[in-house]
Amino acid sequence: MASCGHCGASLTDNATNCPACGMAAGSHAPAGTEADPTFGQPTAPAPKRKGRAFKIALLIIVVLVVLGCFAQCACCSLKDANGSRGREYDWPTGKLAQMLPPMDVKCANVLEDESSLSIRVEEGVTKEGYESYVSQCKERGFSVDSESDEDEYSAYSEEGYLLKLRFSEYGDPDINIDIYAPRTNGELTWPDHGLAALLPAPGKAKGSVAVDTSSQFQAYVGDMSEEEFKSYVDACMEKGFTVDYSNDEKYFTADDAMGNSLRLEYQGFNTMYVSMYASREEDEEGVDAASNASAEDADSANAGNAGSAPTPVPARSDTGFDLSGTIEPAVMLDNDVLKVEATGLEYRNDNAYLELAITNKTKSEISVTTSTLGYSANYVNDCMMSEGYISSDIPAGETVEEEACYDLQELQLEGLQGIGEIGLGLRVVNEDYDELFKDMIAVRTSLYGAEGIDAGTFADSVLNPAYLNGMDLQAKMAVSDAQDVGSSGIVVQSAGIFTNRDGDKAAMVEFKNNSDKTVRVAASDITVDGTMVYEGLWTSNLIAAGKRALMDDIHLSYMAEENANQLDLSNVRELGMKVAVYDANDNTILKPTEVNIAF
């Protein structure tokens, strides 16, 4: 009997798809071969647990530097990625952990610093156990401004500590526990310069300023009630933040006439979050000059006085990502099974959100998913990616609203500087798990076809010295002429060896599909300088015709542990692997073929 090479489940001889993860059975491993359910595409790609463990480790460094080590991702270090392959951790004993009810289990992941703690538990997890743990946390005082649904719970303690719990029963059930120290216990001094000077001072004594640069401002304001939050929104609109505004009970977003972008969020526990980006990279004097503009100038700009209002420029993030791409309501799919309509595209908290309305046109409940092991075929522009995860159960005849989330830093690492087109690899099954639909659907934004939104390869993006320095990374790249992989139409466009500040190393390899068919590219038998560091199938990526994909989870530091005495990872000269290519039905297009990349 064979076993699935992706999740390890047993397969019958005539199986066409794995019953556990949905992947085609053609990529199985022989019985008895160790299979790895945690690498490649994520088995449970919830929005805050991305399967690109090392890349998230690299990206999170930016967050750690900017927000003072305010870690938010439970899977953001190579050490933690190793943990998902069998390493276990004791229940933590630090200050934040002592506020939680302890579990008498080994943890699959633990990430802790002074301001946050993330724990993932897999041992013996059940839905009943999760519900019991929620009750214990409530007894510990985490019940202020609580929010909950079937699988998630969040609440503050009386001291302002924020707790978030999430239960997942996809594959092996697990519980994710995140606790954050208060952001508003300190003394708040509102800046009188830069971007902050364009906003009304909130008049509160408690809070913290997280970021204050010429291009970005972030702050947390304490002791602010929901009514005071609404009043502050009104005051910001009076200051000129009325362009393309969106205002609801707890969120406000708008630009001013100069193109500066503002986001306000009431987060509970009398806390307001303020985030603001400059319209373009300006020096401090330029922003200060804008902050000294009179209220009359702002009023005339809002009144449409073209003679005095500056010319609006496209909004950009702090790193230059173009935030001006918009989507007009458009039907992405309409067949006998479902209707999918893109209703908008919003940018907030350094993410892009594709807003969707999905209607079940059948007479029974359906499950709609994207970016899962069963079918991971999402893309943005010309690049395949795991961003944009959706999982929704929709009763017969009903319509649900969903959001597909895209991390802007993730997009930039792929070499993107703006969103021109979003593709969703959609898979739909009924209550009996019969597959009703599986295909890619797409919607284009106002930036489609614009120059400058694609760097071409991820190497073109990460080789920017400012990008690498900002992420505290070292990179060794191979960016010579594209290397053909047999006659499959697949080429190796670029590759890199990345080292984070902890010395952990990973390889990333970018493939381009120049054929006219969607294919799956599988990598196995990884070598470093001729020494085998991993034998067998490691990972695979689905690549649509004309698209590219970044194989970003080749964790060299982990792989080389057993051969540490034979290898010098500080100076990798050659990365080798066997690459196989399969069509959409898992027919072999190219048998495993040696690929060697010189650095």
Image (cartoon, rainbow, N blue to C red):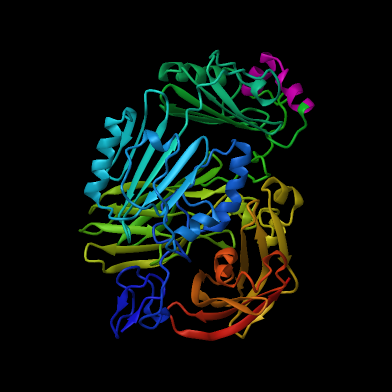
Does 361 lie within the magenta span? no
Q: Residue furthest front?
A: 565
- In this view of the protein, which residue sits in the foreground, 350 or 88? 88
Q: Is residue 129 visible?
A: yes
Q: Is residue 442 visible?
A: no
**What's the magenta region?**
285-303
In the figure, is residue 235 to the left or right of 27? right
Dividing the picture into quadrants, the one containing residue 312 is top right
In the figure, is residue 106 to the left or right of 243? left
Residue found 30% across the figure and 85% down from its top: 13
Residue found 28% across the figure and 82% down from its top: 12
Mainly helix, strand or loop, the magenta region?
helix
How far from the left and from the top, in percent, is residue 386?
49, 59
How far from the left and from the top, in percent, is residue 87?
44, 60
Image quarter (top left, top right, bottom left or bottom right) of the N terminus: bottom left
Does 301 lie within the magenta span? yes
How far from the left and from the top, in percent, is residue 316?
65, 40
* For residue 32, above or below residue 560: below
